[in-house]
Amino acid sequence: MSKNVLILPGDGIGPEIVTQAKRVLELVNSQFSLDLEFTEALVGGAAIDADGVPLPASTLEAAQKADAILLGAVGGPKWDTNPDFQIRPEKGLLGIRSNLGLFGNLRPAILYPQLAHASSLKPEIVSGLDILIVRELTGGIYFGQPRGIRVKEGGIREGFNTYVYDENEIRRIGRVAFEAARQRGKKLCSVDKANVLEVTVLWREIMEEVAKDYPDVELSHMYVDNAAMQLVRAPKQFDVMVTGNMFGDILSDAAAMLTGSIGMLPSASLDVNGKGMYEPCHGSAPDIAGQGKANPLATILSVAMMLRYSLDAGEAADKIEAAVSQVLDQNLRTADIMSEGMTAVSTSQMGDAVVAALKG
Ligand code: NAD
């Protein structure tokens, strides 16, 4: 039976990078007889311009029907000044995440050896780095109630938030992480602050419980402060890391920056059934939009993640990742990863090279 992929190009460089990623997806669709069908819709600023809202009902409906979603990026200065936060591009993304229950955020930090010099750390510390951070995306302190700013006795204002997870929320993100670890190096490090926060005492207990179903995966625990330190000291010790929303937000950005190249990093946000939205980690880069300078590889690698996690096409995913490595071996570089002696290419030329490697 055919599967439907919803394509949301979005704003800024979104349409340029998605065009290249779609070429790659269409090619592997025919090479591996995947029987994929494609639908396209508006989200973010593009949707505000056309329909007045960042997530039109027709886009949400298409997202609900799709088997997987590929997103470019949303946002830009044109829409940033709207005082009504409901009419901001980011609301389009948040709306899809919450309506579809996309609670499991997978963010790989991979450093291709060819780009080791791009990191701010020494090449020997990061070369060949391949970490997957699994972040809980719809709970924790970012959503906990009560929250707000109130005035207490003596007229002193205080801000407060609630860090809360129930055991089901912890269990389901735990399962996503264990499943991912099982498909990789079979090592999972759960990050918490169980020496201080009761909510993460429960987090640790539930992770231990879930571990019983995954005897082939080695589970360890680390406090978040130590995890931050270890990520910059010896990041290659990690295979998969799992953590809550706020710790994951911070650690995944730190891990991403170890690779030094935001244009290379894909991500996935999954629901309980493995359906997901796939997008590059970077934003809409309005400073380079429309100039053919954007690196399409993060979006192309997001297509690989989509094939692996939502479309049961791991072989096609492997082939795309190998093709990306091959174009780097050919010394082709977009401006963000350019260095001496390399050949500068545009967004579409990088797409051409990946397509050629796939056909090769
Ligand atoms: P950004 O990631 O768009 O850009 C940061 C820097 O990285 C810029 O210099 C940009 O040119 C460069 N860059 C980003 N992607 C690149 C690529 N593929 N190739 C080459 N260079 C690339 O972050 P920002 O400037 O903080 O945000 C710009 C807009 O994007 C804002 O409106 C923001 O709200 C939005 N944003 C959207 C998402 C998303 O859609 N998921 C995520 C982050 C930011």
Image: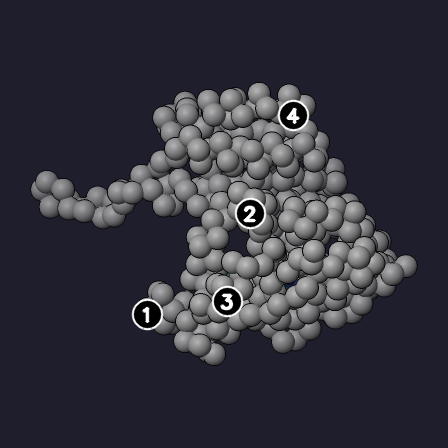
Q: Counting residues from the N terminus, which is met first, the one under dot 4 or under dot 3?
A: 3
Q: Return the residue found at the far right.
A: 360
**In which quadrant of the rendered image does the C terminus lie?**
bottom right
Mark 3, residue position? 59
Q: Nearer the viewer, mark 2 or mark 1?
A: 2
| Mark 2 vs mark 1, CA separation in Å | 31 Å
**In which quadrant of the rendered image does the N terminus lie?**
bottom right
Give the structural element (helix, strand or loop) at label 2.
Answer: strand
Q: Nearer the viewer, mark 4 or mark 2?
A: 2
Disc 3 crowd rating (10 Å Cα; few below 14, some 14-19, many 20+) is many
Mark 4, residue position? 217
Image point (54%, 25%), residue name: 210
Mark 2, residue position? 270
Q: Counting residues from the N terminus, which is met first, the one under dot 1 or under dot 3?
A: 3
Q: Quadrant of residue 164?
A: top left
Image point (66%, 66%), residue name: 38
Disc 3: residue Cβ within 8 A of ligand 1's nearest atom: no
Q: Counting residues from the N terminus, which is met first, the one under dot 4 or under dot 2?
A: 4
Q: Are marks 3 and 2 in contact (CB under 8 Å)?
A: no
- The residue type indicated by label 1 comes to Pro
Disc 2 crowd rating (10 Å Cα; few below 14, some 14-19, many 20+) is many
Q: Counting residues from the N terminus, which is met first, the one under dot 2 or under dot 1?
A: 1
Q: Position of residue 105 (x, y in %)?
A: 54, 45
* Closer-to-camera residue (274/237): 274
Mark 1, residue position? 83
Disc 1: residue Cβ within 8 A of ligand 1's nearest atom: no
Q: Nearer the viewer, mark 4 or mark 3?
A: 3
- The residue type indicated by label 3 comes to Thr
- The residue type indicated by label 2 comes to Leu
Q: Quadrant of residue 217?
A: top right
